[in-house]
Image (cartoon, grey):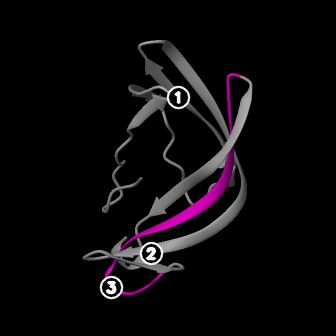
Amino acid sequence: MRLPGGADGVAAACVGDTHSVRPAKVIAMPLLAEDDSNHDRYQIVLDTEEGRHAIDADIVAAIGTTSYMTPNWMALGAGTAPEVTQIVSDGATRFTWDGEQGFGHTQRSRAPEHRS
């Protein structure tokens, strides 16, 4: 996520299975630009006590866009109101990890144009 003002945001991760959830150190997790379709494929790299994990991601379809506003509101679409602090676009994503595939979503965030 990109923080208001344009700075890189927070990257946090964990790895889990049916028995436990364990912390992971983020080695590589790209900050995706909303207008950069070259990043429809990317890789997440994590270190855990068990070793290094590389997860390939492929955004396969756009899901929608949400505007987040202060203090704790959200609305569908890319809003232009002064209260909008973050615009988030979601994409359906296929993840491949150790030869197995699963599906989830990728979020791209940006500041609204009036805050740029």
**What's the residue type where badge 2 is placed?**
Ser
Quickly name the residue at label 1: 17
From the viewer's side, name the closer residue of 33 and 89.
Answer: 89
Q: Is residue 57 above or below residue 22?
A: below
| Magenta stretch: helix, strand or loop mostly | strand
Q: How crowded is mark 2: few (under 14 residues within 10 Å), some or many (20 or more)?
A: many
Q: Residue at x 39, y 55 (%)?
A: 2
Element type at marker 1?
A: loop
Identify the image quadrant of the C terminus. Answer: bottom left
**Residue 35 visible, this orientation:** no
From the viewer's side, name the closer residue of 24 and 7.
Answer: 24
Quickly name the residue at label 2: 67
- The picture places residue 108, in percent across and down from the top left corner, at 52, 57
Calculate the distance from the C-alpha at mark 3 to the C-alpha at mark 2: 11 Å
Quickly name the residue at label 3: 82
Q: In this view, does 35 lie above or below 96?
A: below
**Residue 67 placement: quadrant:** bottom left
**Residue 32 visible, this orientation:** yes
Q: Residues within 10 Å of mark 3 (few under 14, many from 20)?
A: few
Q: Is 86 a magenta residue?
A: yes
